[in-house]
Amino acid sequence: MYEDEQHQTAPEVSVTPEPQAELAKLQLEVAKIQAQTNAGWQEVVTKLADMWQKHSAGKSTSERRYTTTLTIGILVFLATIVGALSVLTLRGIVSGESLVFFLGTLTGSVLMLVSERIKTREE
């Protein structure tokens, strides 16, 4: 029996590049996971940027609405004053020179207002 045991040889273990192949597969999996994670973060950042842009656009719209409402209010107020001053001038209570002076001042103010709005839209 002892002799038979000596003649038995251990099975040959071939050293193949399987561990390297396994390592390469694992590295490939890690790279895929990292790519998916990076793509996920890029998607999150893109969504946040879009949300910020929409918020900024909405803010600009509300500011524009406020400016338009304020401008219309001022113009209605000035039209009321001009109408009242014209009626007073027609009745002879206020001189025509006062009306012309006020209209000149008002025209200059309106021209400045319009020029500021044009500059704002160009920017």
Image (spheres, rainbow, N blue to C red):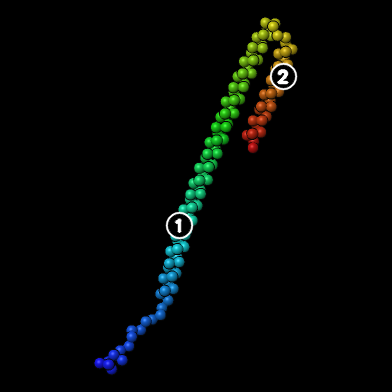
Residue 108 placement, left or right of 54: right
Give x and y (percent) for residue 74. 62, 22
The amino acid at mark 1 is Gln
Judging depth in this view, the residue of 3 and 45 nearest the camera is 3
Query: Which of marks 1 and 2 precedes in the sequence?
Result: 1
Which quarter of the figure is the C terminus placed in?
A: top right
| Total numbered labels placed on residues in the image | 2
Image quadrant assignment for residue 116: top right
Residue at image coords 65%, 9% = 87
Residue 34 placement, left or right of 112: left
In the image, farthest residue toward the bottom: 3
Give the residue number, with chain letter if any, for mark 2. 104
Which quarter of the figure is the N terminus placed in?
A: bottom left
Between the residue at mark 2 and the residue at mark 1, the CA separation in whole angstroms equals: 68 Å
Q: Characterize the local packing of mark 1: few (<14), some (14-19) or many (20 or more) Cα atoms within 10 angstroms.
A: few
Give x and y (percent) for residue 78. 64, 18
Residue at image coords 67%, 5% = 91
Give the residue number, with chain letter if any, for mark 1. 36
- Mark 2 touching mark 1, by CB under 8 A? no
Give x and y (percent) for residue 23. 43, 70
In the image, farthest residue toward the front: 2
Whether residue 4 is situated above or below residue 119 in the rendered picture? below
In the image, farthest residue toward the left: 1
Whether residue 85 is situated above or below residue 42 in the rendered picture? above
Residue at image coords 62%, 15% = 80
Residue 78 placement, left or right of 1: right
Q: Secondary structure at mark 2?
A: helix
Image quadrant assignment for residue 62: top right
Residue 43 placement, left or right of 111: left
The amino acid at mark 2 is Gly
